[in-house]
Image (cartoon, rainbow, N blue to C red):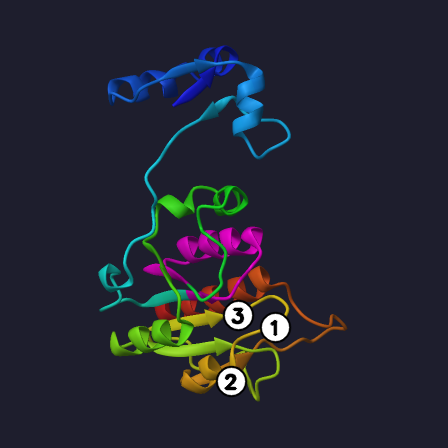
């Protein structure tokens, strides 16, 4: 852990806890802290940490009620927000597939607001493989697709479900749409052209979570 003097005094409890865990703590200058940080106003603490993602075959998919799969999601703020929503909705895991952003990206970590540390996270190069693994685990696979014939309010959301969300600009690959059990769109009742990816994911994930609990 690297800490400025100001941060050491301002976060004494955190630094003391790190010391109790035998974490090596190094005092650094404000200039060094700025160099280590991606933010304009760094907090003065940085740390070297182990990666959080794990192999897909170790995820608790069997018996899961809700899983979120991000296929080619490129914006770290969106990815982090979806991880946060999945955590709040009681999802069992989040899978980042294809060319999705690294969940350890600083903006993604901040957008997750701590949820990155609560949920099992996995990465896999092939979105279609992620879909197959979810189905093999007994999950119904629903693909969020703005041009789908089936609207969300026409779907029984109670069964155990893996929701698949695609790239912000290009949506889901054709093979993923073909492999899904159903493609589902969120109906737009007003004049908005579309919903932000993270907003759409929140509607879908919470719809399933609340239906399952009813």
Residue segment shown in magenta? 69-96
Closest to the camera, between mark 1 and mark 2, is: 1
Q: Horizontally, is 176 left or right of 52 in the view?
A: right
- Give the alpha-carbon distance from disc 3 to disc 1, as whole Å: 7 Å
Q: Horizontally, is 140 left or right of 136 in the view?
A: right
Q: Earlier in the sequence, mark 3 or mark 2?
A: 2
Residue at x 35%, y 35% (from the top left corner): 49
Quadrant placement of the C terminus = bottom left
- SS for tag 3? loop
- Residue bearing the label numbered 3: 166
Asked if marks 3 and 1 touch (Cβ < 8 Å), the reply is: yes
Q: Position of residue 121 (x, y in %)?
A: 35, 55
Asked if marks 3 and 2 touch (Cβ < 8 Å), the reply is: no
On whether residue 120 falls in the magenta region, the answer is no
- Residue bearing the label numbered 2: 154
- Give the alpha-carbon distance from disc 1 to disc 2, as whole Å: 25 Å
Quadrant placement of the N terminus = top left
Categorize mark 2 by other alpha carbons within 10 Å: few (<14), some (14-19), many (20+). few
């Amino acid at each position: 852990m690297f800490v400025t003097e100001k941060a050491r005094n301002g976060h004494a409890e955190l630094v003391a806890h790190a010391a109790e865990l035998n974490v090596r703590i190094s005092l650094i200058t404000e200039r060094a802290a700025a160099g280590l940080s991606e933010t304009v106003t760094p907090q003065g603490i940085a740390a070297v940490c182990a990666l959080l993602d794990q192999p897909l075959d170790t995820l608790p998919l069997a018996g899961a009620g809700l899983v979120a799969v991000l296929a080619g999601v490129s914006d770290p703020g969106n990815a982090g927000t979806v991880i946060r929503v999945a955590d709040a909705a009681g999802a069992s895991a989040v899978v980042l597939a294809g060319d999705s952003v690294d969940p350890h990206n600083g903006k993604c970590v901040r957008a997750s607001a701590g949820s990155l540390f609560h949920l099992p996270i996995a990465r896999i190069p092939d979105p279609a493989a992620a879909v197959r693994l979810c189905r093999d685990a007994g999950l119904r696979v629903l693909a969020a697709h703005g041009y789908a014939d089936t609207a969300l309010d026409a779907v029984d959301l109670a069964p155990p479900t893996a929701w698949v969300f695609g790239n912000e600009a290009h949506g889901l690959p054709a093979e993923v749409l073909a492999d899904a059990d159903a493609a589902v769109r969120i109906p737009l009742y007003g004049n908005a052209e579309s919903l932000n990816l993270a907003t759409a994911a929140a509607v879908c994930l919470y719809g399933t979570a609340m239906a399952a609990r009813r």
